[in-house]
Image: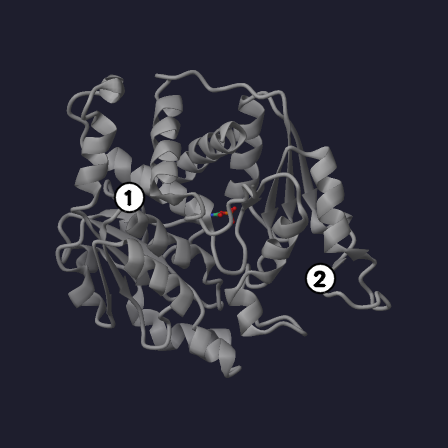
Amino acid sequence: MNKSFIIGDEFGVDFIKKVISDAILFKNDIIKIPKHDKSALFLFFNKSLRTRMSFMFAAQQMGMQTVCEDILNLYSFEMENVPMNSDKPEHIKDAARVMSRYADVIGIRNSCFIGGGKLPKNSSVEDVISDKFINIFAKYATSPVINMESDAYHPMQGLALIMSIFEKIPTTSGFESQFSEYNEFERKFDEFKTKKIVLTYAPHTKHLPIATPQSQLLAPAMMGSNVILTCPKGFELSDVCLEKVCKYASSFKIIHNQDEALQGADFVIAKSWLSIDNLTNGNLEESDIYYEKYKNWQLTESKMNLTNNALFSHCLPVRRDVEVTSSVLDSKNSMIIDEAENRMWVQMSLINSLFKS
Ligand code: CP
Protein backbone atom coordinates (compact mmCIF):
# COMPACT_ATOMS: atom_id res chain seq x y z
CA MET A 1 0.00 0.00 0.00
CA ASN A 2 1.32 3.48 -0.92
CA LYS A 3 0.90 5.52 2.26
CA SER A 4 2.03 8.82 0.79
CA PHE A 5 0.14 11.98 1.69
CA ILE A 6 0.37 14.38 -1.22
CA ILE A 7 -3.01 16.00 -1.91
CA GLY A 8 -4.62 15.47 1.49
CA ASP A 9 -7.69 13.41 0.59
CA GLU A 10 -5.86 10.13 -0.13
CA PHE A 11 -7.17 8.36 2.97
CA GLY A 12 -10.58 10.05 3.18
CA VAL A 13 -12.37 12.40 5.55
CA ASP A 14 -12.38 10.08 8.60
CA PHE A 15 -8.58 9.82 8.45
CA ILE A 16 -8.29 13.63 8.49
CA LYS A 17 -10.72 13.87 11.42
CA LYS A 18 -8.64 11.36 13.35
CA VAL A 19 -5.43 13.31 12.60
CA ILE A 20 -7.06 16.53 13.86
CA SER A 21 -8.62 14.88 16.93
CA ASP A 22 -5.31 13.29 17.95
CA ALA A 23 -3.45 16.56 17.36
CA ILE A 24 -5.86 18.32 19.76
CA LEU A 25 -5.39 15.56 22.35
CA PHE A 26 -1.57 15.75 22.08
CA LYS A 27 -1.59 19.56 22.28
CA ASN A 28 -3.82 19.58 25.35
CA ASP A 29 -1.81 16.81 27.02
CA ILE A 30 -4.91 14.56 27.22
CA ILE A 31 -2.96 11.83 25.42
CA LYS A 32 0.82 11.68 25.79
CA ILE A 33 2.87 12.35 22.66
CA PRO A 34 3.57 8.92 21.12
CA LYS A 35 7.16 7.76 20.81
CA HIS A 36 8.55 6.11 17.66
CA ASP A 37 11.95 4.51 17.31
CA LYS A 38 12.05 5.60 13.66
CA SER A 39 13.77 8.08 11.37
CA ALA A 40 12.51 11.03 9.32
CA LEU A 41 14.16 12.75 6.36
CA PHE A 42 13.01 16.23 5.36
CA LEU A 43 14.11 17.41 1.90
CA PHE A 44 13.88 21.09 1.06
CA PHE A 45 14.20 22.33 -2.52
CA ASN A 46 12.89 25.74 -1.36
CA LYS A 47 13.14 28.09 1.59
CA SER A 48 11.00 27.58 4.68
CA LEU A 49 10.65 28.74 8.28
CA ARG A 50 7.50 27.09 9.66
CA THR A 51 7.56 23.82 7.72
CA ARG A 52 11.20 23.10 8.46
CA MET A 53 10.99 23.88 12.17
CA SER A 54 7.56 22.44 12.86
CA PHE A 55 8.47 19.10 11.24
CA MET A 56 11.80 18.91 13.05
CA PHE A 57 10.22 19.70 16.43
CA ALA A 58 7.29 17.35 15.79
CA ALA A 59 9.50 14.39 14.89
CA GLN A 60 12.00 15.06 17.67
CA GLN A 61 9.26 15.33 20.29
CA MET A 62 8.23 11.83 19.18
CA GLY A 63 11.79 10.66 19.83
CA MET A 64 12.59 10.18 16.15
CA GLN A 65 15.96 10.56 14.47
CA THR A 66 15.73 13.47 12.02
CA VAL A 67 17.75 14.62 9.03
CA CYS A 68 16.95 17.86 7.19
CA GLU A 69 18.59 18.35 3.79
CA ASP A 70 18.64 21.30 1.40
CA ILE A 71 18.79 20.99 -2.37
CA LEU A 72 22.18 22.70 -2.39
CA ASN A 73 23.59 19.52 -0.85
CA LEU A 74 21.88 17.14 -3.30
CA TYR A 75 22.38 16.16 -6.92
CA SER A 76 19.77 17.41 -9.38
CA PHE A 77 17.40 14.63 -10.37
CA GLU A 78 16.38 13.39 -13.80
CA MET A 79 12.66 12.54 -13.95
CA GLU A 80 12.37 11.28 -17.53
CA ASN A 81 13.38 7.88 -18.87
CA VAL A 82 16.09 9.19 -21.18
CA PRO A 83 19.83 8.54 -21.55
CA MET A 84 21.25 10.72 -18.77
CA ASN A 85 23.72 12.82 -20.74
CA SER A 86 22.43 16.19 -19.44
CA ASP A 87 23.46 18.09 -16.29
CA LYS A 88 21.35 15.83 -14.01
CA PRO A 89 23.56 13.12 -12.53
CA GLU A 90 21.00 11.06 -10.57
CA HIS A 91 17.61 9.60 -11.47
CA ILE A 92 14.75 10.32 -9.07
CA LYS A 93 13.84 6.62 -9.17
CA ASP A 94 17.19 5.63 -7.65
CA ALA A 95 17.27 8.53 -5.18
CA ALA A 96 13.75 7.78 -3.87
CA ARG A 97 14.55 4.10 -3.33
CA VAL A 98 17.87 4.82 -1.62
CA MET A 99 16.41 7.45 0.72
CA SER A 100 13.64 5.03 1.66
CA ARG A 101 16.30 2.63 2.94
CA TYR A 102 17.53 5.34 5.33
CA ALA A 103 14.30 6.97 6.49
CA ASP A 104 10.95 5.59 7.68
CA VAL A 105 9.14 8.71 6.42
CA ILE A 106 10.24 11.32 3.88
CA GLY A 107 8.96 14.91 3.71
CA ILE A 108 9.49 16.84 0.48
CA ARG A 109 9.12 20.54 -0.26
CA ASN A 110 9.53 21.15 -3.97
CA SER A 111 7.67 24.01 -5.62
CA CYS A 112 8.79 25.97 -8.67
CA PHE A 113 6.94 29.13 -7.57
CA ILE A 114 7.98 29.63 -3.93
CA GLY A 115 9.39 33.15 -3.71
CA GLY A 116 7.51 34.09 -6.87
CA GLY A 117 8.40 33.11 -10.40
CA LYS A 118 7.67 31.76 -13.83
CA LEU A 119 7.54 28.21 -15.12
CA PRO A 120 11.00 26.63 -15.16
CA LYS A 121 12.48 25.67 -18.52
CA ASN A 122 11.21 22.34 -19.90
CA SER A 123 8.15 22.41 -17.56
CA SER A 124 4.53 22.78 -18.55
CA VAL A 125 1.50 24.08 -16.69
CA GLU A 126 0.30 20.45 -16.70
CA ASP A 127 3.48 19.41 -14.82
CA VAL A 128 2.60 21.97 -12.14
CA ILE A 129 -1.08 21.05 -11.84
CA SER A 130 -0.30 17.32 -11.75
CA ASP A 131 2.55 17.65 -9.23
CA LYS A 132 4.86 15.61 -11.41
CA PHE A 133 7.98 15.66 -9.22
CA ILE A 134 6.52 14.53 -5.90
CA ASN A 135 4.29 11.93 -7.54
CA ILE A 136 7.21 10.32 -9.36
CA PHE A 137 9.24 10.39 -6.14
CA ALA A 138 6.37 8.77 -4.18
CA LYS A 139 5.88 6.14 -6.91
CA TYR A 140 9.41 4.83 -6.35
CA ALA A 141 9.79 5.52 -2.60
CA THR A 142 9.11 2.58 -0.33
CA SER A 143 8.64 4.83 2.73
CA PRO A 144 5.61 7.12 3.03
CA VAL A 145 6.16 10.52 1.42
CA ILE A 146 4.64 13.62 3.02
CA ASN A 147 4.04 16.69 0.88
CA MET A 148 5.60 19.68 2.66
CA GLU A 149 4.42 21.90 -0.26
CA SER A 150 4.54 20.90 -3.86
CA ASP A 151 3.55 22.82 -6.97
CA ALA A 152 -0.14 22.06 -6.53
CA TYR A 153 -0.87 21.41 -2.82
CA HIS A 154 0.27 22.26 0.70
CA PRO A 155 -1.77 19.76 2.73
CA MET A 156 0.10 20.55 5.96
CA GLN A 157 -1.27 24.09 5.84
CA GLY A 158 -4.70 22.63 5.12
CA LEU A 159 -4.50 20.43 8.22
CA ALA A 160 -3.31 23.31 10.42
CA LEU A 161 -6.14 25.48 9.10
CA ILE A 162 -8.78 22.87 9.97
CA MET A 163 -7.30 22.35 13.43
CA SER A 164 -7.26 26.11 14.07
CA ILE A 165 -10.89 26.54 12.97
CA PHE A 166 -11.87 23.48 15.03
CA GLU A 167 -10.21 24.98 18.13
CA LYS A 168 -12.24 28.18 17.75
CA ILE A 169 -15.56 26.31 17.78
CA PRO A 170 -16.52 26.45 21.47
CA THR A 171 -16.10 23.25 23.48
CA THR A 172 -19.09 22.29 25.64
CA SER A 173 -18.55 18.90 27.25
CA GLY A 174 -14.74 18.64 27.22
CA PHE A 175 -12.57 16.44 25.06
CA GLU A 176 -12.43 13.78 27.76
CA SER A 177 -15.90 12.81 26.51
CA GLN A 178 -14.31 11.55 23.30
CA PHE A 179 -15.12 7.94 24.11
CA SER A 180 -18.85 8.59 24.66
CA GLU A 181 -21.43 7.70 22.04
CA TYR A 182 -21.72 11.20 20.56
CA ASN A 183 -18.45 12.72 21.54
CA GLU A 184 -17.21 16.28 21.61
CA PHE A 185 -15.20 15.81 18.45
CA GLU A 186 -18.20 14.65 16.44
CA ARG A 187 -20.29 17.54 17.78
CA LYS A 188 -17.63 20.06 16.78
CA PHE A 189 -17.11 18.47 13.36
CA ASP A 190 -20.89 18.69 12.85
CA GLU A 191 -20.81 22.38 13.79
CA PHE A 192 -17.86 22.88 11.43
CA LYS A 193 -20.20 21.98 8.54
CA THR A 194 -22.40 24.99 9.29
CA LYS A 195 -19.54 27.51 8.96
CA LYS A 196 -19.09 29.89 6.05
CA ILE A 197 -15.43 29.94 5.14
CA VAL A 198 -14.09 32.48 2.63
CA LEU A 199 -10.72 32.28 0.89
CA THR A 200 -9.86 35.69 -0.53
CA TYR A 201 -7.15 36.59 -3.00
CA ALA A 202 -4.70 39.16 -1.57
CA PRO A 203 -2.46 41.51 -3.56
CA HIS A 204 1.29 40.92 -3.76
CA THR A 205 4.30 42.07 -5.73
CA LYS A 206 5.22 38.47 -6.68
CA HIS A 207 3.45 35.67 -8.52
CA LEU A 208 3.11 33.14 -5.71
CA PRO A 209 2.27 29.41 -5.87
CA ILE A 210 -1.24 27.99 -6.06
CA ALA A 211 -0.40 25.16 -3.64
CA THR A 212 -1.39 26.82 -0.38
CA PRO A 213 -4.67 28.38 -1.55
CA GLN A 214 -5.67 25.07 -3.16
CA SER A 215 -5.19 23.30 0.18
CA GLN A 216 -6.81 26.18 2.10
CA LEU A 217 -9.89 25.61 -0.06
CA LEU A 218 -9.82 21.82 -0.11
CA ALA A 219 -9.25 21.23 3.61
CA PRO A 220 -12.37 23.03 4.95
CA ALA A 221 -14.33 21.59 2.02
CA MET A 222 -13.35 18.11 3.25
CA MET A 223 -14.90 19.02 6.61
CA GLY A 224 -18.16 19.65 4.71
CA SER A 225 -18.21 23.44 5.21
CA ASN A 226 -19.75 26.14 3.04
CA VAL A 227 -16.75 27.38 1.09
CA ILE A 228 -16.41 30.55 -0.98
CA LEU A 229 -13.51 31.54 -3.21
CA THR A 230 -13.23 35.24 -3.99
CA CYS A 231 -10.60 36.39 -6.46
CA PRO A 232 -10.14 38.48 -9.61
CA LYS A 233 -11.34 36.82 -12.82
CA GLY A 234 -8.68 34.41 -14.12
CA PHE A 235 -7.40 33.51 -10.62
CA GLU A 236 -9.82 30.61 -9.99
CA LEU A 237 -7.18 27.94 -9.21
CA SER A 238 -7.03 24.59 -11.01
CA ASP A 239 -10.08 22.73 -12.31
CA VAL A 240 -8.78 19.55 -10.68
CA CYS A 241 -8.77 21.22 -7.26
CA LEU A 242 -12.15 22.92 -7.75
CA GLU A 243 -13.73 19.59 -8.72
CA LYS A 244 -12.50 18.11 -5.45
CA VAL A 245 -13.80 21.11 -3.48
CA CYS A 246 -17.24 20.70 -5.10
CA LYS A 247 -17.20 16.98 -4.25
CA TYR A 248 -16.62 17.53 -0.50
CA ALA A 249 -18.09 20.93 0.46
CA SER A 250 -21.68 21.44 1.66
CA SER A 251 -21.72 24.32 -0.81
CA PHE A 252 -19.12 26.03 -2.98
CA LYS A 253 -19.26 29.35 -4.83
CA ILE A 254 -16.81 31.55 -6.68
CA ILE A 255 -17.67 35.23 -6.21
CA HIS A 256 -15.58 37.86 -7.98
CA ASN A 257 -16.92 40.70 -5.81
CA GLN A 258 -14.86 40.56 -2.59
CA ASP A 259 -17.28 42.65 -0.47
CA GLU A 260 -20.19 40.43 -1.48
CA ALA A 261 -18.20 37.25 -0.69
CA LEU A 262 -17.20 38.46 2.78
CA GLN A 263 -20.79 39.15 3.91
CA GLY A 264 -21.62 36.91 6.87
CA ALA A 265 -18.34 34.93 6.75
CA ASP A 266 -17.35 33.02 9.91
CA PHE A 267 -13.72 32.52 8.86
CA VAL A 268 -11.69 34.50 6.34
CA ILE A 269 -8.45 33.21 4.87
CA ALA A 270 -6.29 35.64 2.88
CA LYS A 271 -3.62 34.49 0.43
CA SER A 272 -1.97 35.64 -2.77
CA TRP A 273 -1.38 33.36 -5.76
CA LEU A 274 -0.67 33.53 -9.45
CA SER A 275 -3.20 33.33 -12.23
CA ILE A 276 -3.08 29.99 -14.06
CA ASP A 277 -4.57 31.77 -17.10
CA ASN A 278 -1.67 34.22 -17.12
CA LEU A 279 0.85 31.47 -16.45
CA THR A 280 -0.47 29.52 -19.45
CA ASN A 281 -0.28 32.48 -21.82
CA GLY A 282 3.04 33.73 -20.36
CA ASN A 283 1.50 37.04 -19.31
CA LEU A 284 2.88 37.48 -15.77
CA GLU A 285 3.21 41.23 -15.15
CA GLU A 286 6.22 42.98 -13.60
CA SER A 287 5.90 43.34 -9.82
CA ASP A 288 4.91 47.03 -9.64
CA ILE A 289 2.25 46.69 -12.37
CA TYR A 290 0.95 43.48 -10.82
CA TYR A 291 0.61 44.97 -7.35
CA GLU A 292 -0.99 48.18 -8.62
CA LYS A 293 -3.55 46.25 -10.64
CA TYR A 294 -4.91 44.23 -7.73
CA LYS A 295 -4.10 46.35 -4.66
CA ASN A 296 -7.79 46.94 -3.97
CA TRP A 297 -7.98 43.30 -2.90
CA GLN A 298 -6.00 44.10 0.28
CA LEU A 299 -7.91 42.78 3.31
CA THR A 300 -8.70 45.66 5.66
CA GLU A 301 -10.58 46.15 8.92
CA SER A 302 -13.51 47.74 7.08
CA LYS A 303 -13.80 44.65 4.86
CA MET A 304 -13.64 42.38 7.93
CA ASN A 305 -16.55 44.43 9.34
CA LEU A 306 -18.72 42.95 6.57
CA THR A 307 -18.30 39.49 8.08
CA ASN A 308 -19.97 37.67 10.96
CA ASN A 309 -17.16 38.85 13.29
CA ALA A 310 -15.01 36.36 11.35
CA LEU A 311 -11.80 34.86 12.58
CA PHE A 312 -8.86 35.52 10.31
CA SER A 313 -6.27 33.11 8.88
CA HIS A 314 -3.08 33.54 6.88
CA CYS A 315 -0.51 30.77 6.33
CA LEU A 316 2.51 33.14 6.80
CA PRO A 317 4.85 34.53 5.75
CA VAL A 318 2.70 37.60 5.09
CA ARG A 319 3.59 40.95 3.52
CA ARG A 320 2.11 43.26 6.17
CA ASP A 321 0.12 46.21 4.82
CA VAL A 322 0.41 44.81 1.30
CA GLU A 323 -1.67 41.64 1.40
CA VAL A 324 -3.48 42.40 4.65
CA THR A 325 -3.39 45.41 6.99
CA SER A 326 -1.50 45.03 10.26
CA SER A 327 -4.71 45.97 12.08
CA VAL A 328 -6.31 42.73 10.77
CA LEU A 329 -3.19 40.61 11.34
CA ASP A 330 -2.85 41.83 14.93
CA SER A 331 -6.57 41.88 15.78
CA LYS A 332 -8.08 39.68 18.48
CA ASN A 333 -9.72 37.65 15.69
CA SER A 334 -6.42 36.75 14.06
CA MET A 335 -5.46 33.04 14.28
CA ILE A 336 -2.11 33.40 12.50
CA ILE A 337 0.24 32.50 15.35
CA ASP A 338 -2.00 29.71 16.71
CA GLU A 339 -2.20 28.25 13.22
CA ALA A 340 1.58 28.35 12.79
CA GLU A 341 1.93 26.48 16.10
CA ASN A 342 -0.69 23.96 15.00
CA ARG A 343 1.49 22.99 12.05
CA MET A 344 3.65 21.12 14.58
CA TRP A 345 0.72 19.30 16.22
CA VAL A 346 -1.00 18.17 13.01
CA GLN A 347 2.27 16.99 11.49
CA MET A 348 3.09 15.02 14.63
CA SER A 349 -0.36 13.47 14.46
CA LEU A 350 -0.05 12.73 10.74
CA ILE A 351 3.30 10.97 11.11
CA ASN A 352 1.89 8.96 14.02
CA SER A 353 -1.17 7.97 11.96
CA LEU A 354 0.94 6.96 8.95
CA PHE A 355 3.08 4.71 11.15
CA LYS A 356 0.01 3.12 12.76
CA SER A 357 -2.03 2.55 9.58
N1 CP B 1 3.33 28.43 5.76
C1 CP B 1 4.51 27.84 5.46
O1 CP B 1 4.56 26.76 4.89
O2 CP B 1 5.59 28.54 5.90
P1 CP B 1 7.10 28.26 5.47
O3 CP B 1 7.18 28.60 3.99
O4 CP B 1 7.91 29.21 6.32
O5 CP B 1 7.43 26.84 5.72
Nearer the camera: disc 2 or disc 1: 2
In the rendered structure, which disc, 2 or 1, sits on the residue that comes first in sequence? 2
* Other residues around mark 2 within 10 Å, as few (<14) / some (14–19) / many (≥20): some
Instruction: Give me the residue at 32% from left, 77% from top.
Output: 233
For the residues labelled 2 and 1, say whether their Cβ atoms are less than 8 Å apart. Answer: no
Label 2 SS:
loop
User: Which residue is denoted by mark 1 in the rendering?
Assistant: 334
Q: Residue at x 43, y 31 (%)?
A: 345
Q: Position of residue 356 (x, y in %)?
A: 50, 27
Which amino acid type corresponds to the residue marked 2 in the rendered image? Answer: Met
Going by the picture, which residue comes out furthest to the right? 85
Residue 265's quadrant in the figure?
bottom left
Front-most of residues 81 and 332: 81
Q: CA distance from mark 2 to mark 1?
A: 42 Å
Kindly tell me whether residue 117 is visible in this rendering. Answer: no
* Residue denoted by label 2: 79
Q: Is residue 165 visible?
A: yes
Residue 94 drawn at (x, y percent): 77, 50
Judge whether 27 appears above or below 262 on screen.
above
Q: Amino acid at mark 1?
A: Ser
Tell me: residue 163, above or below residue 126: above
Colouring convention used in this rendered image of the protein: one colour
